[in-house]
Image (cartoon, rainbow, N blue to C red):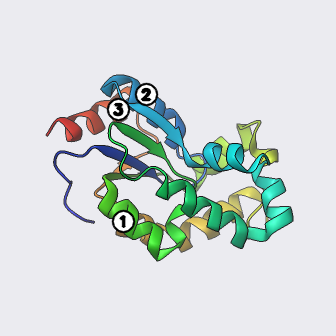
């Protein structure tokens, strides 16, 4: 992983679905007095469709293109905490923009933690399956493929299973240098 960037003006949270990017992001933004943005929420609002509808109409390729556009829209905006979609790191262009755009924190978690959260998440039904397999198998497969990409662009890795307050304080201390 890269060294932690000093004087970050943006924080990007990367990691798999259910790692807590949105929850941690909102809490960090409130703690820092910054704005919060979720790239999935931005791209669905811009498209006027759910993720599932975008994927049905444009395929994953269309969704990934929209994801890159949502990331580009965050660049140059200071005082911003951004929760990215779990697949944001799939494109090399996105990994580069993340690395260069601010402090990147990878919220990592075990398959059991992530699958358990997804099973309890009422929004899980709105998220299209990536593999069509049972949730724990899908989480394991997707995590195995993406873990190196998350680590490649992250300046710091944090345990998604840690207490929210502890995660926010760790990130705030990195911002404060």
Q: Choose mark 1 or mark 3, whichever is in front.
A: 1
Q: Which mark is residue 131?
A: none
Q: From the viewer's perspective, tell me whether residue 135 is left or right of residue 144.
A: right
Q: Nearer the viewer, residue 154 or 12?
A: 12
Q: Secondary structure at mark 2?
A: helix
Residue at the image position 46 percent from the left and 41 percent from the top: 161
Residue 97 lies, in percent from the top left, at 39, 64
Is residue 131 visible in this depiction of the protein? no
Residue 12 lies, in percent from the top left, at 40, 49
Within 10 Å of disc 3 (Cα), the crowding (few <14, some 14-19, many 20+) is: many
Q: Which residue is mark 2?
A: 27
In the rendered view, would you say 39 is above or below 27?
below
Q: Which residue is mark 3?
A: 168
For the residues bearing labels 1 and 3, Cβ distance under 8 angstroms: no
Q: Which residue is mark 1?
A: 153
Q: From the viewer's perspective, tell me whether residue 4 is left or right of residue 13.
A: left
For the residues bearing labels 2 and 1, Cβ distance under 8 angstroms: no
Residue 145 lies, in percent from the top left, at 55, 74
Q: Nearer the viewer, residue 56 or 73?
A: 73
């Amino acid at each position: 992983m890269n060294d932690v960037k000093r004087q970050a003006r943006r924080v990007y949270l990367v990691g798999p679905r259910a790692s807590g990017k949105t929850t941690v992001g909102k809490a960090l933004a409130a703690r820092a007095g910054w704005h919060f943005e979720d790239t999935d929420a931005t791209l669905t609002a811009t498209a006027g469709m759910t993720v599932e509808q975008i994927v049905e109409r444009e395929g994953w390729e269309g969704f990934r293109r929209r994801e890159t556009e949502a990331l580009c829209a965050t660049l140059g905006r200071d005082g911003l905490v951004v929760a990215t979609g779990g697949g944001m790191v799939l494109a090399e262009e996105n990994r580069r923009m993340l690395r260069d755009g601010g402090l990147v924190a990878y919220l990592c978690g075990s398959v059991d933690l992530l699958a358990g959260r997804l099973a309890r998440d009422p929004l899980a039904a709105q998220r299209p399956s990536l593999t069509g397999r049972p949730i724990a198998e899908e989480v394991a497969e997707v995590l195995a493929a993406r873990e190196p990409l998350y680590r490649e662009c992250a300046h710091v890795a944090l345990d998604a299973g840690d207490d929210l307050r502890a995660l926010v304080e760790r990130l705030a201390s990195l911002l404060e240098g």
